[in-house]
Image (tube, helix red, strand yellow):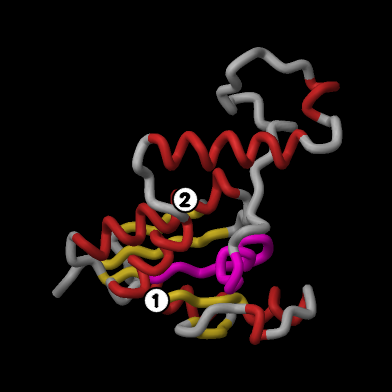
């Protein structure tokens, strides 16, 4: 019987998008049965187009910046785009896979993606905005799996 891992993805920013995909793809490669439950802002990670996934230096004090930046500067228009561009360059420079590549790797490894139906309804998303191979269900559906896992993570 294989080990199981459940991940709850609640954030849709660039820095919070990597952990669920990296952990899920790694666990799947190790033979785990893996499910990710995407809820609230985490649903952004199931969109067909991930180009709008950004990172914000504001209220992110641990984010390493090339030079110290006062909070007032972090609030200026364009800083989110600049921080996103810098992070994507750093990821590419160090050979880290893109979000699209990691997501595809998860799907190829049979990681099950579950979109929270309540959140889809709440934010009035159209399912056509999301990639294929997504199941829709509620917390009870996911908890049926999560309750039997060896590892359950909230990201």
- Give the secondary structure at mark 2: helix
Looking at the picture, how far across and down is residue 83, in whole percent? 65, 35
- Marks 2 and 1 sit apart, C-alpha to C-alpha, by 16 Å
Residue 37 in percent (x, y) is at 51, 69
Q: Residue at x 33, y 69 (%)?
A: 34
Looking at the image, residue 68 sits to the left or right of residue 18; the answer is right
Residue 29: image quadrant is: bottom left
Q: Residues within 10 Å of mark 1 (few under 14, many from 20)?
A: some
Whether residue 147 is visible = no
Which of 33/45 is in front?
A: 45
Q: Which residue is mark 2?
A: 18
Count of numbered tags: 2
Whether 108 is drawn above or below 66: the answer is below
Asked if 54 appears above or below 77 in the picture, the reply is below
Please tell me which residue is depicted at 32% across the width and 60% down the height of the picture.
25
Nearer to us in this view, 16 or 7: 16
Crowd rating for badge 2 (residues with CA inside 10 Å; few <14, some 14–19, many 20+): many
- Secondary element at image label 1: strand
Which stretch did the figure color magenta?
35-49
- Relative side of 60 to 36, left or right: right
Query: In terms of image quadrants, where is residue 6?
Result: bottom left
Task: Please state the horizontal and vertical placement of residue 73, each as a whole percent of the image.
Answer: 81, 22
Corner quadrant of residue 140:
bottom right
The stretch drawn in magenta includes residue 47: yes
| Left or right of residue 47: residue 18 | left
- Percent across and percent down for residue 118 are 69, 79
| Residue drawn where x is 26% and y is 65% of the image | 28
Q: Residue at x 54, y 79 (%)?
A: 131
Q: Which residue is mark 1?
A: 112
């Amino acid at each position: 019987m294989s080990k199981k891992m459940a991940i709850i993805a609640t954030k849709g920013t660039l820095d919070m998008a990597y952990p669920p995909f990296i952990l899920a793809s790694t666990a799947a490669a190790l033979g785990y049965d893996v499910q990710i439950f995407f809820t609230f802002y985490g649903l952004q990670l199931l969109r067909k187009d991930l180009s709008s996934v950004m990172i914000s230096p504001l209220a992110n004090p641990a984010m390493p910046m090339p030079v110290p930046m006062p909070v007032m500067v972090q609030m200026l228009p364009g800083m989110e785009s600049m921080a996103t561009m810098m992070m994507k360059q750093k990821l590419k420079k160090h050979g880290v896979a893109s979000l699209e590549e990691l997501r595809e790797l998860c799907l190829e490894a049979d990681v099950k993606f579950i979109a929270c139906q309540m959140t889809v309804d709440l934010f009035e998303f159209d399912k056509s905005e999301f990639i294929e191979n997504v199941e829709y269900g509620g917390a009870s559906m996911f908890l049926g799996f999560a309750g039997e896992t060896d590892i359950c993570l909230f990201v």
